[in-house]
Amino acid sequence: ADSTIADFTEQAQACWQEEWLAKDSASRALMDPALADLRISATTLNDFLAYDSDDLEGTHSKGVFLGDKLFGFPGAPTTALDFGSILHGFLEKELKNVLQGEPGETVSEDELIRFTENEIANLDYASDELDQLKQRFKAFYQVYLPHWKTIVQADPTQYVAEQWVSARLDDTIPLTGKCDLLFLDKLQKKVTIFDYKSGNRKTPEKVREERGGIGYQRQLEFYQLLIENTVEPGLEGYQVESVTDVFVEPQVKQKMELLAPVPFTPGPESLKHLANLVRMFWWRIQKRDFDTHAFETSAMLAAEDAANVYKSDAKGGKKGDHKPLAEKALQKLYEQWLIEDWQQRR
């Protein structure tokens, strides 16, 4: 009994994320059922690809990926996520039940607003946080909703809300994702994808800063990959015109003004890179090979790190001194290594 307790204590004190590597039959037996029917989403891909320079064993992002897929670990509730989901749900109901509803089956906008206010009131947060969410919702339906309706009301039948899309890259790799809003140009067979963004981003510069994130941009690119490889009825054969960020909350510090939508059109090289990342990830899933710590000792990283020096005297060091690679540069290098490693070992 004592040895069992000691063993258990030792295991409990170890980082569980170090145990995810499928090195034995027991590990594979745990992984196989969870991964057998996995379809790759933007979130799943980003969880696997995220590189943490403080995580020298490369286990953190893989722990997030496997913790979610294998064990279904729930994330901590946050007002940002819950409120964002509520606004998504409101706009979906506004389109389907108010604007597109069959005669006699529609609901009024006032009813929908009251329903959503009750939904917010029933969230499990402190009263001051709920009061803030109620004020944000009021600003949303008073400022943003009229603007949204002027666009959608022109022809509601051309819009599809909260659409799940399945696809297969190379006819074999299963992809999945949910698009907030689609505008279908049925004559030209083109689609515009709208991605709702909630929260107070304060300035256009803040928006551009967020859009500069690799994971953020990859998510937008993934939507295009998804749509252009789908065989979903009604979507097959469509080409993506653009992926457009739509900011659904007025900016409090900008006199309650709405930020202009920001369209994004991925270039062919970016889409090619994304497709190769998906292929690499699918290959690793099939092999149950999630060990990427070899990147830390790779010649690619060593050469890039050695060549990175201060070009002039700066706060961090003098001209010619070694300069640590920036996080964004490390992420790009890591993705390049993952693709080259896959191409060499497949």
Image: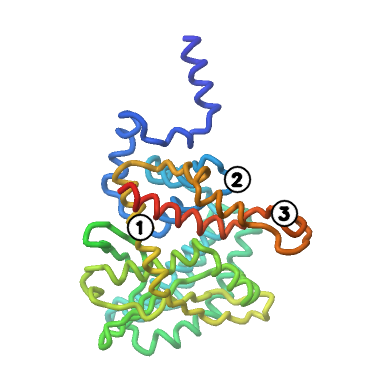
Secondary structure under the numbered disc 2 in the rendered image: loop
Most foreground residue, 160 or 165: 165
Residue 297 lies, in percent from the top left, at: 52, 43
Cα–Cα gap, marks 2 and 1? 25 Å
Secondary structure under the numbered disc 1 in the rendered image: helix
Name above or below for residue 142 compared with residue 130.
below
Residue sitting at x 39%, y 50%: 341
Residue sitting at x 63%, y 64%: 132
Residue type, numbered disc 3: Asp
Q: Nearer the viewer, mark 3 or mark 1?
A: 3
Residue that mark 3 sits on: 321
Residue that mark 1 sits on: 278
Would you say the residues marked 3 and 1 are in contact, meaning their CB atoms lie under 8 Å apart? Answer: no
Looking at the image, residue 50 sits to the left or right of residue 278; the answer is right
Residue 332 lies, in percent from the top left, at: 51, 59
Would you say the residues marked 2 and 3 are in contact, meaning their CB atoms lie under 8 Å apart? Answer: no
Cα–Cα gap, marks 2 and 3? 21 Å
Which class describes the residues within 10 Å of circle 3: few (<14), some (14-19), or many (20+)? some
Most foreground residue, 116 or 209: 209
Most foreground residue, 304 or 8: 304
Secondary structure under the numbered disc 3 in the rendered image: loop
Q: Reading the chain from its start, which is encountered first: label 3 or label 1?
A: 1
Which class describes the residues within 10 Å of circle 1: few (<14), some (14-19), or many (20+)? many
User: Which numbered tag is attached to residue 315?
Assistant: none
Residue 301 lies, in percent from the top left, at: 53, 50
Residue 245 lies, in percent from the top left, at: 48, 75
Most foreground residue, 109 or 321: 321
Residue that mark 2 sits on: 54
Looking at the image, residue 165 sits to the left or right of residue 231; the answer is right
Residue type, numbered disc 1: Val
